[in-house]
Image (cartoon, grey):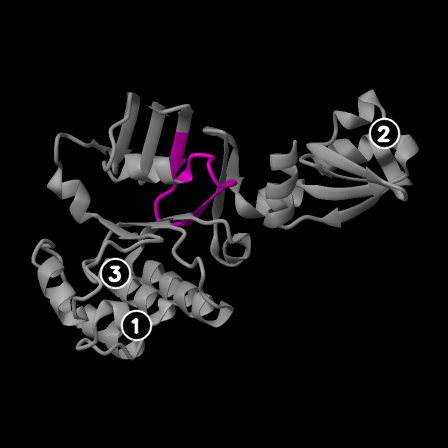
Amino acid sequence: MSAIEISNVTKTLNEFELNIENLNIEKGFITGFIGPNGSGKTTTIKLILNMIFKDSGSIKIFGKEYKSDDIDIKQMIGYVGDVSGYIPESKLKDIKKGISVFYKNWDEKVYQKYVEKFKLNENKRYKDLSKGQQKKFELVMALSHHPKIIIMDEPTANLDPLVRNEFLEILQEHIEKEEATVFYSTHITSDLDKVSDYLVFIYNGKIIFKGERDIILDNHRIIRGNKNLIDNDTKKELVSFKENQFGFEGLTSNVKSAYEVFGEEVVYDKANLEDILMYYTRG
């Protein structure tokens, strides 16, 4: 069973339209959700969290679909976003006290373990924490009720690399112990290069591609060569390309097929997720 199943979901917000025909998030893995701003990442997450209502289609969490207010489903989900929603003037211990009572699986030992690990002072007000400490506290709150699914919407935005690495290490450690599922939306593709098992790329409200990260990276290559190699047939092998005074540079999504066309006349370089995102957006 998939952790999240999305089928034929549509949602119109002003002039933006989200249309996801089929998307299954694999249980027990980290799935990266990428795409440029305005593509529908946050809208999709809000639909999964039942914060907004879909126009049509089906969203199931471990085979269950939301009713008007399905507490059982919400018990299974932990969330860390760009904005926490906590009252800035509240002390950490008061935030914990107010939220923990809503979770039947709240684990005070897990909470205290991570508070000590992150060296968080519970008597401090949330607004007095650094950005990094705020995110650590939000992660602690998300992990302390043993969620089966952890949904993240730009959780490491504006954090320095050291804090991001610590954040990701704790996340990986937790899901290995808990066999949890992570759905991780971010524009920081280097984070997903490190931790993701699967990738979903959304653009203009539609899923452009999805699959195992390693297979996607293996299939994509940046191709560089002479401009005279570009014609109507060779363009078909490229997601998009750009030309300069020295030649052309483009991205292929099928390196085997591209090799049959270009052969040894071009250079094939590995592409990272940032490269892939850039060329698909350009295309």
* Real-space Cα separation, disc 1 to disc 3, in angstroms: 19 Å
Magenta segment, which residues?
23-41
Regarding residue 191, the answer to whether it shows in the image is yes
| Secondary-structure class at tag 2 | loop
Q: Answer whether labels 2 and 3 touch (C-beta < 8 Å).
A: no
Most foreground residue, 62 or 266: 266
Q: How crowded is mark 3: few (under 14 residues within 10 Å), some or many (20 or more)?
A: many
Give me the residue at 32% from left, 63% from top. Answer: 174
Give me the residue at 15% from left, 64% from top. Answer: 95
Give me the residue at 41% from left, 39% from top. Answer: 41
Q: Residues within 10 Å of mark 2 (few under 14, many from 20)?
A: some
Most foreground residue, 189 or 63: 189
Q: Per the image, is 283 magenta? A: no
* Real-space Cα separation, disc 2 to disc 3, in angstroms: 51 Å
Q: Per the image, is 36 magenta? A: yes
Location of residue 6 by image quarter: top left
First in residue order: circle 1 vs circle 3: 1
Q: In which quarter of the image is the N terminus?
A: top left
Residue receiving disc 3: 143
Residue receiving disc 1: 129
Give how far across and how far down residue 194 sits, in percent: 52, 59
Res 230 label: 2
Q: Nearer the viewer, mark 2 or mark 3?
A: 2
Most foreground residue, 71 or 213: 71
First in residue order: circle 2 vs circle 3: 3
Give how far across and how far down residue 10 sits, in percent: 35, 22
Regarding residue 1, the answer to whether it shows in the image is no
Give me the residue at 28% from left, 58% from top. Answer: 178
Residue type for callout 1? Leu
Residue type for callout 3? Leu
Give how far across and how far down residue 254 sits, in percent: 69, 34
| Secondary-structure class at tag 3 | helix
